[in-house]
Structure formats: structure tokens, C-alpha cells
Amino acid sequence: MINFKNLTFQNIKQKLQVKKPWDDVIIFVLNILISIPSFLIAHENLIELNWEFNLDRILLFILIVVATQLILRLLRTVIIICIVIYILVLVYGTVLGNYGFESVYEDYDSMIYTMSNNPNPQDIIISKLLPFPNKSKILRAIEYKNPKVRNFAVMAVNKNFKNIKGYSDYRTIIQCFAVFKEINSRWNYVSDPKDGDYIATASESLEFLSGDCDDHSILMAACVRAIGGTPRLIHTKGHIYPEILIGTMNDLETANFLIKNKLFVKESHGQQLHYHIDERNQIWLNLDYTAKYPGGPFMSEEILGALTLN
């Protein structure tokens, strides 16, 4: 009786260990489907070690793939259930507009693109800034509630990048990039009078899209603010330029992908994004009139003051 039970157990064990030709294929496919979103979650939540060639992220991905492979082999008998549950979760997310198949692809695509096209931070922390020159005049000149300013920004949004789909969470940033494109493609630099600074209002600069760096910064900040973006002005020695708030490092990955792969492909080809990280670890991209794409090279890197429009 004991031998019969042992024999039965051995037979069952052997049957469970029998490998069908398609077993390895199913396990491999499921491994990739599970490993990619798992890696994206780990990538977004674990501290980056900033190793050369992104070796820390490569090793993390390999570790997740190996661990997933081992787990799947141990759970060979319930592999179909795992497949069904995984697909149902992604279908559910896709139908409700949450995290679904398209989201997995976009996150993976933007992460891989950023790993091969690293943005370039300039100043890590901006601190001990000097008082911003002509602060009260500049704030009054940023007429983001002026109908002319708002209408110009809306025109730019309807003219540029209307067909970029699948990035609803970044709609405002994309629209602000449309404003950047419209202003910078038409801006003509004109110096102030020799006897002092002339600070033009945003609505005044709209008439001819001309002026010096502070006029450009005022107009850019007003238009960005008029459509929901968060701009700020940076004061350097002899220069003022605008920046836009992007958000976190994960948001920067997506912005980098959008700029270099969809919005400013020719302008940013072979280039890096230049940005600042403030004391709250928020990312700000350069929008200077000298930049051909958002995040273009800084004209001047020594920061003396910053004026944020909340």
C-alpha cells in the first residue's frame, strides 16, 4: 500500500515535470510581459545610482527577468491563470483609460529613449539667490489674463502639435511647447534704448514679436501661464530667460522622449536637454529665445536670481 502511494506520487510528479514543446515559449512570452511593467515600476520608485552606461538599470532589468523566470517555472501548472489575469488587468485598464497596453508601451519607450539620450543637468540646486531686478515691473508686464495674450497662446496651441495623441497627462506641457515653437520661430531680437531698460508688456510684444531678452521672457511666461503652465524667469549676468516646470525625473523622461522623438525631432537631433533642479527636486526646462527646442543649451549658466509665477 505504501509503495503504491509512493509510486502514484512519483507518477504525478513526473507528469507535472513533463515539458511540452510550447512550454518554454509561453513562459518566455509571459516573462517579458510581466518583467517590463515590473521593471518600469521599479525604475520609477528606486533611487538611481547613475552608473556609467545605465548599468544599474540594466542589472535591475536582468535581475527582474531572472527572478520572474524562476517563479514562472515553479508555477508552471498555473501559468495559464497568470496569463489570463495579466491580460484582464491590462484590458481593464485600457477600457477605463487607466494603465493599459498603450501605457506600458509608452512608459517603456520613453524610458529606453532617455537611457540612450540622457538629459544634461546644469546647476543641481539653486540657492542663495539675489533679489530679482525690476521684479514689480516685470510681474505687472506678465499679463497672462490679457485676452490678447490668451488668444495668441490658444492660436499657437491650435497651430502646433494638435495631432500628438496618447499623452493626456502631458497635454498642458505639450501645449506650452507649442507656444514656445510659435514665439521662438518668429521672435526678432531688438535692443533696448541705450539710456536704460525698456520693459515691454506681454500684449505690447505681441504686436511685432520683437524685443530683447526680458521682453521675450515676459511674453513667454505670460503665454505659458495663460494656458495652465508654470513658468519662471531666471536672471543671470546681463541676461534673463524663461523656464517651464516639468515636474519629477519621471516627467523629464517623458518630456525628453516627446521633444526628441515627436515634437522637435530635427531641432534636437543629437542634442541633450538642459535643465535645472530646484531645492524641491523639481525639474525646469530652458525656454530661452536662443534655444531651438525646449531644453536647449543655456546662454548663461551663472544664476543670480529666479522669479516663479505660481
Image (spheres, rainbow, N blue to C red):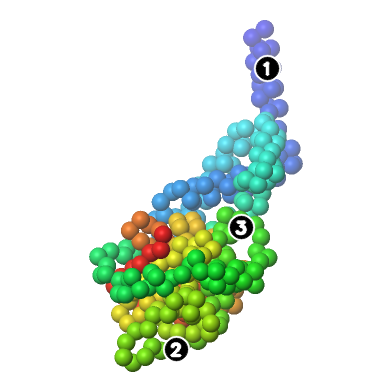
Question: In the rendered view, does 75 fall on the left or right side of 120?
Answer: right
Residue shown at 67% from the left, 43% from the top: 96
Label 2 close to label 1 by CB (< 8 Å): no
Tell me the quarter of the picture where residue 49 sits: bottom left
Rounded to the nearest angstrom, the CA distance separating label 3 from label 2 is 37 Å
* Amino acid type, mark 2: Val
Q: Position of residue 236 (x, y in %)?
A: 32, 76
Residue found farthest to the bottom = 194
Residue found farthest to the top = 1
Residue shown at 52% from the left, 79% from the top: 206
- Which residue occupies the foreground of this view, 107 or 287? 287
In this view of the protein, can residue 130 be seen by the observer?
yes
- Circle nearer the viewer, 3 or 2: 2
- Residue 288, relative to residue 129: is it above or below? below
Residue beneath disc 3: 167
Label 3 close to label 1 by CB (< 8 Å): no
Residue found farthest to the front = 147
* Amino acid type, mark 3: Tyr
Residue beneath disc 1: 7
Q: Which of marks 3 and 1 is nearer the N terminus?
A: 1
